[in-house]
Image (cartoon, rainbow, N blue to C red):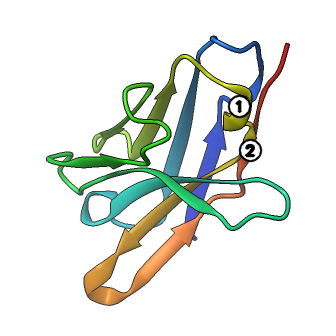
Amino acid sequence: QVQLVESGGGLVQPGGSLKLSCATSGFTFSAYAMNWYRQTPGKERELVAGISRAAGSTNYADSVKGRFTISRDNAKNTIYLQMNSLEPEDTAVYYCNARRMITRTEYWGQGTQVTVSS
């Protein structure tokens, strides 16, 4: 059974930091590129950050470059999103995504709420 479980969300003041985690099981983690997406009510889900299978490359949305860092631990089947200098515009539900292009397979977590407010 495939599981992606996000944690680490919560309420933080502007300028603060949070670190999200996504623990996975039930699939070959090292064979999948991993991504963080976010979504706010009424808007489409947007890609925040992605990391390749062996962590050799990463990519970020322009809005988070220099503030967010994605990483993965293939030994723990877990990815992370370190979020610094958070802004109210970062408020969203953050989702973990696993994607393997060659088999057109992808999985999603249930999401974790991040709220940036004073």
The residue beneath circle 1 is 9
In the visual, does 81 lie left or right of 30?
right
Q: Nearer the viewer, residue 85 or 9?
A: 85
Instruction: Name the mark on residue 33.
Output: none
Q: Secondary structure at mark 2?
A: strand
Image x and y of residue 116, in percent: 76, 25
Image x and y of residue 112, in percent: 73, 43
Q: Residue at x 44, y 25 (%)?
A: 67
Q: Residue at x 57, y 32 (%)?
A: 20
The residue beneath circle 2 is 92
Q: Secondary structure at mark 1?
A: loop
Q: Residue at x 32, y 65 (%)?
A: 32
In the visual, does 43 lie left or right of 85?
right
Q: Amino acid at mark 1?
A: Gly
**Up-down relation of residue 70 to residue 14 (above or below):** below
Image x and y of residue 62, in percent: 42, 44
Q: Amino acid at mark 2?
A: Ala
Q: Residue furthest left?
A: 56
